[in-house]
């Protein structure tokens, strides 16, 4: 059974006090080991601990980049 992550738990994973997690279309990934997510920030535009589905529409890449990262669970 897949772990269910609440929005509150996701917000706590900001890359500073806890490992950096992001959600993409409801799937939560651990991006904390990526140099692109240093201290929970990506390209000075995006922060960890949030759902990024809408933001990806403006990105030069799609959600396929997240397949490299460990999947933590699903956003409740």
Image (cartoon, helix red, strand yellow):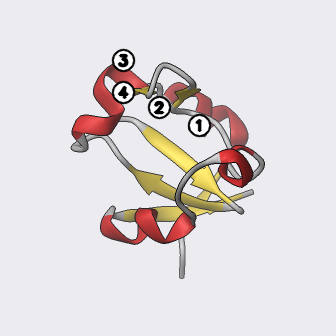
Q: Please report whichever mark, 3 or 1, sits nearer to the chain's N-terminal start.
A: 1
Instruction: Pick the residue in front: 30 or 46.
Output: 46
Please give left or right for residue 19 compared with residue 75 in the image.
left
Disc 3 crowd rating (10 Å Cα; few below 14, some 14-19, many 20+) is few
List the residue tagged with mark 2. Answer: 13
What secondary structure is found at the residue carrying circle 4? loop
What secondary structure is found at the residue carrying circle 3? loop
Residue at the far bottom: name it: 1
Find out whether the residues at labels 4 and 2 contact each other: C-beta distance under 8 Å.
Answer: yes
List the residue tagged with mark 4. Answer: 18
Give the label on residue 17, or none: 3
Find out whether the residues at labels 1 and 4 contact each other: C-beta distance under 8 Å.
Answer: no
Question: What is the x, y in percent for residue 44?
Answer: 48, 19
What secondary structure is found at the residue carrying circle 2? loop
The Cα atoms of the two marked residues, 2 and 1, are separated by 7 Å
* Whether residue 15 is visible: no
Find out whether the residues at labels 2 and 1 contact each other: C-beta distance under 8 Å.
Answer: yes
The Cα atoms of the two marked residues, 3 and 1, are separated by 12 Å
How many numbered marks appear? 4
Asked if 1 appears above or below 37 in the picture, the reply is below
Instruction: Pick the residue in front: 60 or 38.
Output: 60
Residue at the far front: name it: 60
Q: Please report whichever mark, 4 or 2, sits nearer to the chain's N-terminal start.
A: 2
What secondary structure is found at the residue carrying circle 1? helix
Find out whether the residues at labels 3 and 1 contact each other: C-beta distance under 8 Å.
Answer: no
Q: In the rendered view of the protein, which quadrant contains the C terminus?
A: bottom right
Please give left or right for residue 22 compared with residue 38 in the image.
right
Residue sitting at x 55%, y 53%: 60
List the residue tagged with mark 1. Answer: 9
Question: What is the x, y in percent for residue 52?
Answer: 66, 46
Q: In the rendered view of the protein, which quadrant contains the N terminus?
A: bottom right
């Amino acid at each position: 059974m897949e772990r269910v992550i609440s929005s509150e738990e996701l917000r706590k994973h900001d890359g500073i006090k806890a490992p950096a997690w992001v959600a993409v279309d409801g799937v939560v990934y651990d991006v904390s080991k990526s140099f692109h997510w240093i201290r929970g920030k990506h390209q000075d535009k995006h922060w960890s601990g949030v759902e990024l589905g809408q933001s990806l529409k403006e990105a030069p890449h799609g959600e396929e980049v997240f397949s490299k990262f460990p999947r933590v669970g699903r956003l409740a």
